[in-house]
Image (cartoon, rainbow, N blue to C red):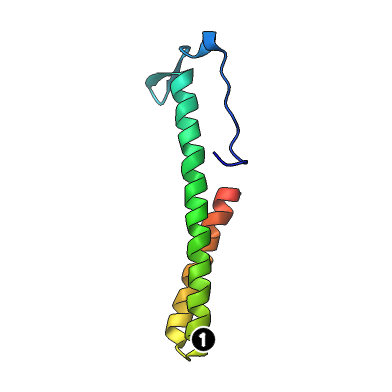
């Protein structure tokens, strides 16, 4: 887990405590596990979007240098969308 992922500690005597989530019963242990997975997945999405944004930035520069305005515009729009993904996650 990344530095931004909070550690979820549960007292051993509470791990099997039942809770109702969306009309389903689960335990605190299962909820903590699901939350840890969600944090990892969000980190992966963020890192993927950052990598994609950088790749698209390079494509945009190359396309601009070659005078391919359609490709440059498309790459810029996709780059902005990738950046928006990271902003939503960091929100």
View extreme (left): residue: 24
- Image check: 23 left or right of 57? left
> In the depicted view, which residue is nearer to us: 14 or 3?
3
Q: Is residue 23 above or below residue 58?
A: above
Q: Position of residue 58 (x, y in %)?
A: 51, 75
Give the residue at mark 1: 64
View extreme (top): residue: 13
Q: What number of labels is visible?
A: 1
Q: Secondary structure at mark 1?
A: helix
Q: Is residue 24 above or below residue 35?
A: above
Question: Residue 74 sits in which quadrant?
Answer: bottom left
Label 1 Cα neighbours within 10 Å, binned few <14 / some 14-19 / many ≥20: some
Q: Position of residue 40 (x, y in %)?
A: 49, 40
Q: Position of residue 56 (x, y in %)?
A: 48, 71
Q: Residue at x 49, y 32 (%)?
A: 35
Q: Residue at x 50, y 45 (%)?
A: 42
> In the depicted view, which residue is nearer to us: 6 or 1?
1
Q: Is residue 82 above or below residue 12?
A: below
Quadrant location, the N terminus: top right
Q: Residue at x 45, y 12 (%)?
A: 16
């Amino acid at each position: 887990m990344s530095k931004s992922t909070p550690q979820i500690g549960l007292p051993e005597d509470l791990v099997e405590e039942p809770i109702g989530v969306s009309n389903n019963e689960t335990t605190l242990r299962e909820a903590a596990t699901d939350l840890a997975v969600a944090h990892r997945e969000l980190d992966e999405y963020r890192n993927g979007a950052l990598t994609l944004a950088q790749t698209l930035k390079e494509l945009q520069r190359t396309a601009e240098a070659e005078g391919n305005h359609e490709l440059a515009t498309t790459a810029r729009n996709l780059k902005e969308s990738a950046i928006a993904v990271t902003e939503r996650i960091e929100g």
